Amino acid sequence: VIFQNNKRGIKMAIDFSKTLGVIFDMDGVLVDSEAVMANASVMGMADYKIYAKPEDFVPYFGTNEETYFGSVVKMHGGIYTKEIAEHIYDIYCDIAPSQIITFPKVPETLSELHNRGYKTAIASSSIKRKLDVNITSAKIDLSCLDAVVCGSDVKNRKPDPEIFLTAAAKLGLKPENCLVAEDAISGVKAAKAAGMYCFGVTTTFDKSFFKELGADLAGESITDILEFLP
């Protein structure tokens, strides 16, 4: 059990003794792939005579593909189609293995959680083939994962809690027995809406921001989770 201050400055207990599973978002939590996705998008769109820049995609990090690709295509006077998206994903899957940055000790942390008896899952809004490439590029041992949920497995995207509830169901756990690791606003909201504890990873925002957002804990990387779990 550890303590932290909530919004009103009142100490509250967080009891992790009932935590049986840990659910991880992918991008910004296990790997840094945003720059790779933006570069693939620039390359892919250029083939359709849409000349975007990597910084055009920054406002749309963490959104669904129609918003991410479509907004930039529209910005440059083009018409978004699924064909463009599929072409970009083809490029991404080609370049990602050599360009994705895996955050420190990700495979080791997942292995340690597995060895301690926790069930683990990845729940990402990404399409399946992008998620599969990310998992492989990060050298994550699939035997350390009990479930993987991608965007096509759910109808509603974050901040709706469906993706985390689906992951919990695949793990055979109740929501209150799960801890979610997230780096995005919509992800934290989804985790709390699901009735789960949430650990904010400060790759995007700082600890104080996560506390205001409602995350139960925050730290620089997922390795910090090991300090809190028995």
Image (cartoon, helix red, strand yellow):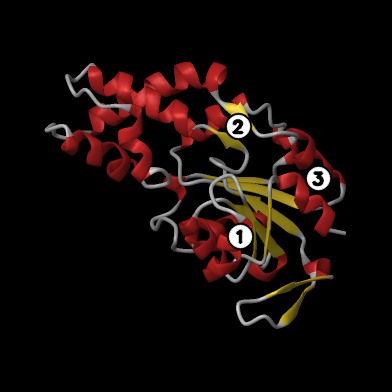
Which SS class for mark 1?
Answer: helix
Residue 145 against residue 193 in the figure, above or below: above
Structural crowding at the residue carrying mark 1, measured as other residues with C-alpha within 10 Å and reported as few (<14), some (14–19) or many (≥20): few
Q: How far apart, in angstroms, are the residues tagged by discs 1 and 2?
A: 21 Å
Q: Where is mark 1, residue-wise?
A: 169
Image point (43%, 38%), residue name? 127
- 114 vs 154, left or right, is right
The local secondary structure at tag 2 comes to helix
Nearer to the camera, 220 or 71: 220
Question: Residue 213, position in %: x, y?
Answer: 53, 66
Tell me the quarter of the image containing the N terminus: bottom right
Q: Report x, y in % for residue 112.
A: 83, 42
Identify the amino acid type marked 1: Ala
Please give left or right for residue 147 compared with residue 132 in the image: right
Q: Quadrant of the C terminus?
A: bottom right
Q: Where does label 3 land, which residue?
A: 114
Instruction: Report the side of 217 relative to 167 (left or right).
Output: right
Task: Identify the residue at horizontal 32%, vertical 19% (top origin).
Answer: 43
CA distance separating discs 1 and 3: 18 Å
Looking at the rendered structure, the secondary structure element under dot 3 is helix
Q: Amino acid at mark 2?
A: Ile
- Residue 160, located in which quarter of the rendered image? bottom left
Labelled pair 1, 3 in contact (Cβ < 8 Å): no
**On screen, residue 221 above or below 107:** below
Q: Can you identify the residue that label 2 sits on? A: 135
**Disc 3 marks which amino acid?**
His
